[in-house]
Amino acid sequence: MNKSIQLFTAIALLFATACDPLNMEDKNPRTPEMETAELNKALSLLEADGYDIDTTDLGIYYIEHVEGKGPLAREGDTLRLEYAGYLLDGRMFDASAFHYPDSVWEFIFTASELIPGFADGLLLMKKGAEIDLIIPSEYGYGAIGYGGIGPYTTLVFATKMHDINPRTDQ
């Protein structure tokens, strides 16, 4: 996930002092307009740095570093995934390494148990794929936020698909 680290370094430099996605210091509540401005800035910076940004039908931005091989992940498959979740300013809020000794999360893929943007991104992945997902709050934690993540906060996930075991009822 070294390519992802480079990506986060690039956008974090822009946002280190420009925004507060956790809404910890700003007494004014975050708005959709604030998020849109931050997201557009980040996307522009990434494009200027030569990253090829694609978009899913749902509206999730993604950068594919490694395509992977084999079939795409589908609901019901058992996935082995490594991930790290960041805010646009580069702060990490979660990672599979926090929860699993080998840093790999193994689970049966059920879209309804994940935020919509993350589930949508998993559908792009094959075994060995490395993809960064840029998820607007509409497909993350929305106007409410979650835990330490403030409202209207774009999420960025660096993901690596270690393995896909197809569901058995095919």
Image (tube, rainbow, N blue to C red):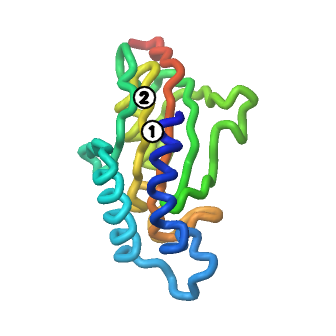
72 is higher (above) or lower (below) than 49: above
User: Dot 2 surroundings within 10 Å: few (below 14), some, or many (20 or more)?
Assistant: some
Indicate the quadrant where residue 111 lies: top left
Q: Which residue carries the number 1 mark?
A: 111
Q: Quadrant of the C terminus?
A: top left
Residue at 72% from the left image edge and 32% from the top image edge: 100
Give the SS element for disc 2: loop
Query: Residue 15, image x and y in percent?
Result: 48, 66
Chain-order first, disc 1 or disc 2 = 2
Query: Residue 127, image x and y in percent?
Result: 45, 19
Residue at 34% from the left image edge and 65% from the top image edge: 41
Residue at 27% from the left image edge and 43% from the top image edge: 54
Residue at 54% from the left image edge and 67% from the top image edge: 16
Q: Amino acid at mark 2?
A: Glu
Q: Amino acid at mark 1?
A: Ala
Q: Which residue carries the number 2 mark?
A: 75
Query: Residue 94, image x and y in percent?
Result: 63, 49
Say which of 153 and 40 sits in front: 40
* Residue furthest out toward the right: 101
